[in-house]
Image (cartoon, helix red, strand yellow):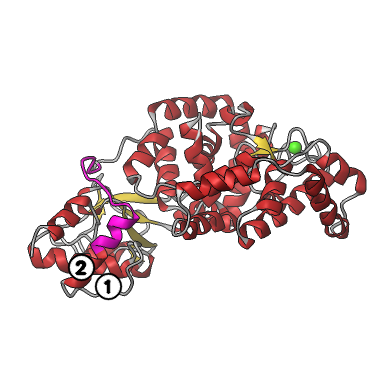
Protein backbone atom coordinates (compact mmCIF):
# COMPACT_ATOMS: atom_id res chain seq x y z
CA UNK A 1 0.00 0.00 0.00
CA UNK A 2 2.29 2.67 -0.99
CA UNK A 3 3.31 4.89 -3.85
CA UNK A 4 0.51 4.30 -4.57
CA UNK A 5 0.06 0.59 -4.91
CA UNK A 6 3.04 -0.13 -2.79
CA UNK A 7 1.92 2.19 -0.04
CA UNK A 8 -1.57 0.78 -0.15
CA UNK A 9 -0.04 -2.56 0.74
CA UNK A 10 1.58 -0.93 3.70
CA UNK A 11 -1.64 0.59 4.87
CA UNK A 12 -3.34 -2.76 4.68
CA UNK A 13 -0.49 -4.05 6.73
CA UNK A 14 -0.90 -1.15 9.03
CA UNK A 15 -4.59 -1.82 9.33
CA UNK A 16 -3.61 -5.24 10.51
CA UNK A 17 -0.91 -3.86 12.75
CA UNK A 18 -1.18 -3.95 16.52
CA UNK A 19 -3.90 -5.78 18.38
CA UNK A 20 -6.33 -2.90 17.97
CA UNK A 21 -5.75 -2.58 14.27
CA UNK A 22 -6.24 -6.32 13.85
CA UNK A 23 -9.85 -5.49 14.31
CA UNK A 24 -9.77 -4.05 10.85
CA UNK A 25 -8.64 -7.22 9.22
CA UNK A 26 -11.16 -9.33 11.07
CA UNK A 27 -13.90 -6.78 10.54
CA UNK A 28 -13.11 -6.65 6.86
CA UNK A 29 -13.26 -10.39 6.64
CA UNK A 30 -16.63 -10.44 8.33
CA UNK A 31 -17.86 -7.82 5.91
CA UNK A 32 -16.82 -9.76 2.88
CA UNK A 33 -19.75 -12.05 3.59
CA UNK A 34 -22.36 -9.36 3.16
CA UNK A 35 -20.91 -6.52 1.11
CA UNK A 36 -21.04 -6.51 -2.64
CA UNK A 37 -19.55 -3.83 -4.84
CA UNK A 38 -23.07 -2.50 -5.30
CA UNK A 39 -23.47 -2.08 -1.55
CA UNK A 40 -20.18 -0.21 -1.41
CA UNK A 41 -21.31 2.16 -4.15
CA UNK A 42 -24.56 2.92 -2.34
CA UNK A 43 -22.68 3.32 0.91
CA UNK A 44 -20.46 5.95 -0.69
CA UNK A 45 -23.33 7.89 -2.22
CA UNK A 46 -25.17 7.78 1.08
CA UNK A 47 -22.27 9.15 3.03
CA UNK A 48 -20.83 11.58 0.50
CA UNK A 49 -23.06 14.56 1.34
CA UNK A 50 -22.28 14.71 5.05
CA UNK A 51 -24.27 17.15 7.11
CA UNK A 52 -21.69 19.46 8.63
CA UNK A 53 -24.04 20.58 11.38
CA UNK A 54 -24.63 16.95 12.33
CA UNK A 55 -20.88 16.34 12.31
CA UNK A 56 -20.38 19.34 14.58
CA UNK A 57 -23.01 17.98 16.97
CA UNK A 58 -21.23 14.63 17.04
CA UNK A 59 -17.93 16.39 17.75
CA UNK A 60 -19.55 18.30 20.59
CA UNK A 61 -20.91 15.02 21.94
CA UNK A 62 -17.33 13.83 22.30
CA UNK A 63 -16.31 16.80 24.43
CA UNK A 64 -17.34 15.50 27.90
CA UNK A 65 -15.29 12.35 27.39
CA UNK A 66 -12.34 14.37 26.08
CA UNK A 67 -12.53 16.76 29.04
CA UNK A 68 -12.58 13.82 31.43
CA UNK A 69 -9.28 12.71 29.89
CA UNK A 70 -7.66 16.04 30.69
CA UNK A 71 -7.97 17.56 27.24
CA UNK A 72 -8.38 21.34 27.32
CA UNK A 73 -11.07 23.14 25.40
CA UNK A 74 -8.38 25.03 23.48
CA UNK A 75 -6.76 21.79 22.30
CA UNK A 76 -10.16 20.32 21.45
CA UNK A 77 -11.22 23.34 19.39
CA UNK A 78 -7.86 23.56 17.63
CA UNK A 79 -7.97 19.83 16.80
CA UNK A 80 -11.37 20.07 15.09
CA UNK A 81 -10.95 23.51 13.50
CA UNK A 82 -11.85 23.21 9.83
CA UNK A 83 -12.20 19.41 10.00
CA UNK A 84 -14.95 17.81 7.95
CA UNK A 85 -15.79 14.11 7.52
CA UNK A 86 -13.82 12.29 4.85
CA UNK A 87 -15.82 9.88 2.65
CA UNK A 88 -12.48 8.54 1.34
CA UNK A 89 -11.89 6.98 4.76
CA UNK A 90 -15.16 5.04 4.55
CA UNK A 91 -14.32 3.92 1.03
CA UNK A 92 -10.98 2.57 2.26
CA UNK A 93 -12.65 0.96 5.24
CA UNK A 94 -15.21 -0.77 3.02
CA UNK A 95 -12.64 -2.08 0.58
CA UNK A 96 -12.16 -5.80 0.74
CA UNK A 97 -8.58 -6.95 1.06
CA UNK A 98 -7.71 -9.45 -1.64
CA UNK A 99 -6.77 -12.54 0.30
CA UNK A 100 -5.69 -14.45 -2.75
CA UNK A 101 -2.51 -12.40 -3.20
CA UNK A 102 0.24 -15.00 -3.04
CA UNK A 103 2.74 -14.43 -0.23
CA UNK A 104 5.61 -14.29 -2.74
CA UNK A 105 4.01 -11.33 -4.52
CA UNK A 106 3.63 -9.52 -1.22
CA UNK A 107 7.15 -10.29 -0.03
CA UNK A 108 8.95 -9.71 -3.35
CA UNK A 109 7.23 -6.36 -3.78
CA UNK A 110 8.14 -5.19 -0.31
CA UNK A 111 11.69 -6.49 -0.29
CA UNK A 112 12.57 -4.98 -3.66
CA UNK A 113 16.06 -4.09 -4.87
CA UNK A 114 15.05 -0.44 -4.66
CA UNK A 115 13.99 -0.76 -1.05
CA UNK A 116 17.18 -2.62 -0.19
CA UNK A 117 19.24 0.11 -1.87
CA UNK A 118 17.38 2.92 -0.12
CA UNK A 119 17.72 1.08 3.18
CA UNK A 120 21.49 0.80 2.77
CA UNK A 121 21.61 4.56 2.21
CA UNK A 122 19.56 5.18 5.34
CA UNK A 123 21.82 2.87 7.37
CA UNK A 124 24.81 4.98 6.34
CA UNK A 125 23.04 8.31 6.80
CA UNK A 126 21.80 7.49 10.30
CA UNK A 127 24.72 5.36 11.50
CA UNK A 128 25.36 7.40 14.65
CA UNK A 129 21.69 7.46 15.59
CA UNK A 130 21.36 3.71 15.03
CA UNK A 131 24.45 3.13 17.23
CA UNK A 132 22.72 5.00 20.04
CA UNK A 133 19.40 3.20 19.51
CA UNK A 134 21.11 -0.20 19.60
CA UNK A 135 23.01 0.81 22.72
CA UNK A 136 19.84 1.89 24.51
CA UNK A 137 17.37 -0.83 23.50
CA UNK A 138 19.52 -3.71 22.25
CA UNK A 139 17.39 -4.03 19.13
CA UNK A 140 19.13 -4.85 15.88
CA UNK A 141 19.46 -1.78 13.61
CA UNK A 142 18.68 -3.78 10.48
CA UNK A 143 15.30 -4.79 11.84
CA UNK A 144 14.50 -1.22 12.92
CA UNK A 145 15.41 0.11 9.46
CA UNK A 146 13.51 -2.75 7.77
CA UNK A 147 10.34 -1.81 9.66
CA UNK A 148 10.86 1.81 8.69
CA UNK A 149 11.14 0.71 5.04
CA UNK A 150 8.06 -1.50 5.23
CA UNK A 151 5.88 1.03 7.01
CA UNK A 152 6.60 4.27 5.15
CA UNK A 153 9.37 3.59 2.61
CA UNK A 154 11.78 5.29 5.02
CA UNK A 155 9.40 8.24 5.30
CA UNK A 156 9.23 8.89 1.55
CA UNK A 157 5.45 8.55 1.47
CA UNK A 158 4.74 10.89 4.36
CA UNK A 159 4.42 14.00 2.25
CA UNK A 160 2.05 12.44 -0.26
CA UNK A 161 -1.28 13.92 0.76
CA UNK A 162 -3.11 11.50 -1.50
CA UNK A 163 -2.09 8.76 0.91
CA UNK A 164 -1.47 10.51 4.18
CA UNK A 165 -4.45 12.21 5.77
CA UNK A 166 -5.10 14.38 8.83
CA UNK A 167 -5.58 11.91 11.67
CA UNK A 168 -8.36 13.78 13.49
CA UNK A 169 -10.34 13.86 10.25
CA UNK A 170 -9.89 10.13 9.54
CA UNK A 171 -10.56 8.95 13.06
CA UNK A 172 -13.60 11.18 13.62
CA UNK A 173 -15.04 9.87 10.34
CA UNK A 174 -14.58 6.30 11.54
CA UNK A 175 -15.86 7.12 15.03
CA UNK A 176 -19.04 8.83 13.84
CA UNK A 177 -19.84 7.13 10.54
CA UNK A 178 -18.10 3.75 10.73
CA UNK A 179 -20.21 0.92 9.39
CA UNK A 180 -20.01 -1.31 12.44
CA UNK A 181 -20.04 -0.81 16.18
CA UNK A 182 -16.53 -2.20 16.42
CA UNK A 183 -15.21 0.19 13.83
CA UNK A 184 -16.88 3.15 15.54
CA UNK A 185 -15.49 2.04 18.87
CA UNK A 186 -12.01 1.74 17.39
CA UNK A 187 -12.31 5.22 15.82
CA UNK A 188 -13.51 6.79 19.06
CA UNK A 189 -10.82 5.20 21.20
CA UNK A 190 -8.07 6.23 18.79
CA UNK A 191 -9.56 9.70 18.35
CA UNK A 192 -9.48 10.36 22.10
CA UNK A 193 -5.89 9.09 22.24
CA UNK A 194 -5.00 11.41 19.34
CA UNK A 195 -6.45 14.35 21.27
CA UNK A 196 -4.28 13.39 24.24
CA UNK A 197 -1.23 13.51 21.96
CA UNK A 198 -2.22 17.01 20.82
CA UNK A 199 -2.80 18.05 24.42
CA UNK A 200 0.77 17.01 25.24
CA UNK A 201 2.01 19.27 22.38
CA UNK A 202 3.95 16.40 20.83
CA UNK A 203 2.80 17.59 17.41
CA UNK A 204 0.27 19.96 15.87
CA UNK A 205 -3.05 19.09 14.18
CA UNK A 206 -1.66 19.97 10.73
CA UNK A 207 1.38 17.69 11.18
CA UNK A 208 -0.58 14.86 12.79
CA UNK A 209 -0.89 12.84 9.61
CA UNK A 210 -1.51 9.16 9.07
CA UNK A 211 -3.32 6.46 7.19
CA UNK A 212 -7.07 6.29 6.81
CA UNK A 213 -7.06 4.04 9.90
CA UNK A 214 -4.98 6.45 11.96
CA UNK A 215 -1.52 4.86 11.81
CA UNK A 216 0.89 7.73 12.06
CA UNK A 217 4.32 8.86 11.04
CA UNK A 218 7.47 7.11 9.87
CA UNK A 219 6.72 3.86 11.64
CA UNK A 220 2.92 3.94 11.59
CA UNK A 221 1.86 3.85 15.22
CA UNK A 222 -1.86 4.15 15.93
CA UNK A 223 -2.54 6.70 18.72
CA UNK A 224 -2.94 4.18 21.59
CA UNK A 225 0.30 2.45 20.59
CA UNK A 226 1.93 5.85 20.40
CA UNK A 227 0.78 6.73 23.94
CA UNK A 228 2.13 3.44 25.26
CA UNK A 229 5.42 3.13 23.37
CA UNK A 230 6.58 6.31 21.59
CA UNK A 231 9.75 7.86 23.02
CA UNK A 232 11.43 11.26 22.86
CA UNK A 233 14.71 9.78 21.69
CA UNK A 234 16.47 13.05 20.85
CA UNK A 235 15.43 14.60 24.18
CA UNK A 236 13.86 17.82 22.86
CA UNK A 237 10.77 17.33 25.02
CA UNK A 238 8.46 16.08 22.25
CA UNK A 239 7.75 12.57 21.00
CA UNK A 240 7.67 13.39 17.31
CA UNK A 241 7.29 10.31 15.11
CA UNK A 242 6.04 12.43 12.18
CA UNK A 243 8.97 14.75 11.54
CA UNK A 244 11.83 13.40 13.65
CA UNK A 245 13.63 10.24 12.53
CA UNK A 246 15.38 9.82 15.89
CA UNK A 247 12.07 9.75 17.76
CA UNK A 248 10.43 7.50 15.14
CA UNK A 249 13.18 4.88 15.04
CA UNK A 250 13.76 5.08 18.79
CA UNK A 251 10.03 4.45 19.27
CA UNK A 252 10.11 1.41 17.00
CA UNK A 253 13.11 -0.05 18.85
CA UNK A 254 11.41 0.66 22.19
CA UNK A 255 8.24 -1.08 21.04
CA UNK A 256 10.17 -4.14 19.83
CA UNK A 257 12.10 -4.22 23.11
CA UNK A 258 8.84 -4.09 25.09
CA UNK A 259 7.52 -6.86 22.84
CA UNK A 260 10.29 -9.14 24.06
CA UNK A 261 13.15 -8.58 21.59
CA UNK A 262 16.19 -10.72 22.48
CA UNK A 263 19.40 -8.78 21.92
CA UNK A 264 21.93 -10.44 19.65
CA UNK A 265 19.49 -13.01 18.28
CA UNK A 266 17.94 -13.29 14.86
CA UNK A 267 14.25 -13.69 13.96
CA UNK A 268 14.52 -17.10 12.34
CA UNK A 269 16.25 -19.29 9.76
CA UNK A 270 15.42 -20.51 6.32
CA UNK A 271 15.58 -24.30 6.59
CA UNK A 272 15.63 -27.42 4.45
CA UNK A 273 13.08 -30.11 5.19
CA UNK A 274 13.93 -33.77 4.69
CA UNK A 275 12.17 -36.04 2.21
CA UNK A 276 8.99 -37.47 3.70
CA UNK A 277 8.71 -34.65 6.22
CA UNK A 278 5.50 -34.50 8.25
CA UNK A 279 3.92 -31.14 7.34
CA UNK A 280 1.53 -31.56 10.25
CA UNK A 281 4.40 -30.19 12.36
CA UNK A 282 4.05 -26.60 11.13
CA UNK A 283 2.66 -23.83 13.32
CA UNK A 284 3.24 -22.56 16.81
CA UNK A 285 1.44 -25.47 18.47
CA UNK A 286 4.28 -27.68 17.29
CA UNK A 287 7.15 -25.53 18.56
CA UNK A 288 10.15 -27.53 19.74
CA UNK A 289 13.84 -26.96 20.35
CA UNK A 290 16.25 -26.45 17.48
CA UNK A 291 18.03 -29.62 18.65
CA UNK A 292 14.76 -31.54 18.25
CA UNK A 293 14.26 -30.06 14.79
CA UNK A 294 17.79 -31.21 13.91
CA UNK A 295 16.87 -34.72 15.03
CA UNK A 296 13.90 -34.57 12.64
CA UNK A 297 16.33 -33.76 9.82
CA UNK A 298 15.57 -30.05 9.62
CA UNK A 299 18.68 -27.93 9.06
CA UNK A 300 19.68 -24.48 7.89
CA UNK A 301 19.92 -23.93 4.15
CA UNK A 302 23.37 -22.48 4.70
CA UNK A 303 24.53 -25.79 6.18
CA UNK A 304 25.60 -23.84 9.27
CA UNK A 305 24.47 -25.26 12.58
CA UNK A 306 21.95 -23.63 14.90
CA UNK A 307 23.90 -21.46 17.39
CA UNK A 308 21.56 -22.05 20.36
CA UNK A 309 20.16 -25.57 20.05
CA UNK A 310 18.02 -25.27 23.17
CA UNK A 311 16.02 -22.33 21.78
CA UNK A 312 12.47 -23.17 20.83
CA UNK A 313 11.32 -22.56 17.28
CA UNK A 314 8.24 -23.15 15.16
CA UNK A 315 8.02 -24.06 11.54
CA UNK A 316 6.42 -21.80 8.93
CA UNK A 317 5.81 -22.62 5.28
CA UNK A 318 3.96 -19.93 3.37
CA UNK A 319 3.78 -21.79 0.08
CA UNK A 320 3.75 -25.48 0.91
CA UNK A 321 6.50 -27.99 0.19
CA UNK A 322 7.78 -26.23 -2.92
CA UNK A 323 8.40 -22.84 -1.28
CA UNK A 324 10.95 -21.82 1.34
CA UNK A 325 10.49 -23.08 4.91
CA UNK A 326 11.46 -21.23 8.06
CA UNK A 327 12.08 -21.93 11.73
CA UNK A 328 10.91 -18.92 13.72
CA UNK A 329 12.48 -17.77 16.99
CA UNK A 330 11.30 -15.50 19.80
CA UNK A 331 12.18 -12.32 17.93
CA UNK A 332 9.76 -13.26 15.17
CA UNK A 333 6.99 -12.93 17.74
CA UNK A 334 8.17 -9.38 18.53
CA UNK A 335 7.87 -8.45 14.86
CA UNK A 336 4.39 -9.99 14.82
CA UNK A 337 3.44 -7.69 17.70
CA UNK A 338 4.14 -4.84 15.31
CA UNK A 339 1.85 -6.31 12.68
CA UNK A 340 0.23 -9.68 13.22
CA UNK A 341 0.59 -11.04 9.69
CA UNK A 342 3.13 -13.77 8.98
CA UNK A 343 3.95 -12.50 5.48
CA UNK A 344 4.61 -9.03 6.92
CA UNK A 345 6.94 -10.37 9.59
CA UNK A 346 8.80 -12.60 7.11
CA UNK A 347 9.24 -9.58 4.83
CA UNK A 348 10.63 -7.51 7.72
CA UNK A 349 13.02 -10.29 8.75
CA UNK A 350 14.15 -10.89 5.19
CA UNK A 351 14.62 -7.18 4.43
CA UNK A 352 16.70 -6.91 7.60
CA UNK A 353 18.85 -9.84 6.46
CA UNK A 354 19.29 -8.32 3.01
CA UNK A 355 20.33 -4.98 4.54
CA UNK A 356 22.86 -6.90 6.63
CA UNK A 357 24.33 -8.29 3.40
CA UNK A 358 22.48 -11.60 3.14
CA UNK A 359 21.18 -13.04 -0.11
CA UNK A 360 17.75 -13.99 -1.38
CA UNK A 361 15.96 -17.09 -0.10
CA UNK A 362 17.73 -20.26 -1.21
CA UNK A 363 14.52 -22.12 -2.04
CA UNK A 364 12.58 -20.20 -4.73
CA UNK A 365 8.85 -19.58 -4.43
CA UNK A 366 6.45 -21.68 -6.54
CA UNK A 367 5.68 -18.62 -8.66
CA UNK A 368 3.47 -20.59 -11.05
CA UNK A 369 1.06 -21.72 -8.34
CA UNK A 370 -2.31 -20.05 -8.28
CA UNK A 371 -4.11 -19.54 -5.01
CA UNK A 372 -7.83 -19.71 -4.32
CA UNK A 373 -10.28 -16.93 -3.46
CA UNK A 374 -12.79 -17.42 -0.69
CA UNK A 375 -15.50 -19.06 -2.82
CA UNK A 376 -13.02 -21.46 -4.37
CA UNK A 377 -11.69 -22.30 -0.94
CA UNK A 378 -15.25 -23.19 0.07
CA UNK A 379 -15.52 -25.36 -3.04
CA UNK A 380 -12.35 -27.11 -1.98
CA UNK A 381 -13.77 -27.73 1.48
CA UNK A 382 -17.04 -29.08 0.04
CA UNK A 383 -15.20 -31.46 -2.25
CA UNK A 384 -12.99 -32.71 0.56
CA UNK A 385 -16.01 -33.24 2.79
CA UNK A 386 -17.84 -35.09 0.00
CA UNK A 387 -14.89 -37.46 -0.19
CA UNK A 388 -15.09 -38.14 3.52
CA UNK A 389 -12.24 -35.95 4.74
CA UNK A 390 -13.07 -34.25 8.04
CA UNK A 391 -14.03 -30.64 7.35
CA UNK A 392 -15.72 -29.00 10.32
CA UNK A 393 -17.01 -25.85 8.58
CA UNK A 394 -17.38 -24.64 4.99
CA UNK A 395 -16.04 -21.19 5.82
CA UNK A 396 -13.41 -20.60 3.14
CA UNK A 397 -10.68 -20.41 5.76
CA UNK A 398 -7.70 -22.68 5.41
CA UNK A 399 -7.03 -23.40 9.08
CA UNK A 400 -5.38 -26.40 10.76
CA UNK A 401 -8.48 -28.56 10.23
CA UNK A 402 -8.70 -27.92 6.50
CA UNK A 403 -4.94 -28.31 6.08
CA UNK A 404 -5.15 -31.66 7.81
CA UNK A 405 -7.90 -32.78 5.44
CA UNK A 406 -5.85 -31.58 2.46
CA UNK A 407 -2.83 -33.51 3.69
CA UNK A 408 -4.93 -36.66 4.09
CA UNK A 409 -6.24 -36.27 0.53
CA UNK A 410 -2.75 -35.56 -0.83
CA UNK A 411 -1.40 -38.67 0.90
CA UNK A 412 -4.18 -40.80 -0.54
CA UNK A 413 -3.52 -39.68 -4.13
CA UNK A 414 0.27 -39.78 -3.83
CA UNK A 415 1.02 -36.03 -3.66
CA UNK A 416 3.45 -34.47 -1.18
CA UNK A 417 1.12 -33.93 1.80
CA UNK A 418 1.92 -30.30 2.57
CA UNK A 419 -1.64 -29.04 3.16
CA UNK A 420 -1.16 -26.15 0.72
CA UNK A 421 -4.38 -25.13 -1.06
CA UNK A 422 -3.78 -24.30 -4.73
CA UNK A 423 -5.89 -24.11 -7.86
CA UNK A 424 -4.13 -27.23 -9.14
CA UNK A 425 -5.29 -29.11 -6.07
CA UNK A 426 -8.88 -27.91 -6.50
CA UNK A 427 -8.79 -28.89 -10.20
CA UNK A 428 -7.59 -32.34 -9.28
CA UNK A 429 -10.44 -32.75 -6.80
CA UNK A 430 -12.94 -31.48 -9.37
CA UNK A 431 -11.80 -33.78 -12.13
CA UNK A 432 -11.21 -36.98 -10.23
CA UNK A 433 -13.82 -39.18 -8.74
CA1 LIG B 1 11.93 14.45 20.36
Q: Position of residue 422 (x, y in %)?
A: 23, 52
Residue 133 to residue 280: above or below: above
Viewer-side residue, 216 vs 381: 381
What is the tally of numbered marks visible in this picture?
Answer: 2
Q: Which residues are magenta?
A: 365-380
Q: Is residue 372 magenta?
A: yes
Do tag 2 and tag 1 residues touch (Cβ < 8 Å)?
yes
**SS category of the residue bearing label 2:** helix
Q: What residue sits 34% from the left and 46% below the top?
A: 103
Q: In the rendered view, does 271 fall on the left or right side of 67?
A: left
First in sequence: mark 2 vs mark 1: 2
Q: What residue sits 42% from the left and 36% below the top?
A: 110
Residue neighbourhood size for the residue with mark 2, other residues' Cα within 10 Å, grouped as few (<14), some (14–19), many (≥20)? many
Image quadrant for the C terminus?
Answer: bottom left
Q: Position of residue 341 (x, y in %)?
A: 45, 53
What label sits on residue 384 in the rendered view?
Answer: 2
Q: Which residue is mark 1?
A: 391
Q: In the rendered view, does 237 fall on the left or right side of 41?
A: right
Amino acid sequence: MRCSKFYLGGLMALAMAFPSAMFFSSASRAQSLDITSLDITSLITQTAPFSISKYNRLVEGLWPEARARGISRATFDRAFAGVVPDPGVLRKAAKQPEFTTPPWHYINKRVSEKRIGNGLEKLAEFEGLLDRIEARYGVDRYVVVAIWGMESSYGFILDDRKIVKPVIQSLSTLAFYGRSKRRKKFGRKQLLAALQILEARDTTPDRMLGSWAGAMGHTQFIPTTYLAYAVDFDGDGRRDIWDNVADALGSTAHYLKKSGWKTGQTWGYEVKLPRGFNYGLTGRRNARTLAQWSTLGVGRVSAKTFPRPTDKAWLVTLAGARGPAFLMLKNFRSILRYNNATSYAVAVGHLADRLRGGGPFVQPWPEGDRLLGREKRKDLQRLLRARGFGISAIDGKIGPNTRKAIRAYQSRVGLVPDGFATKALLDRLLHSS
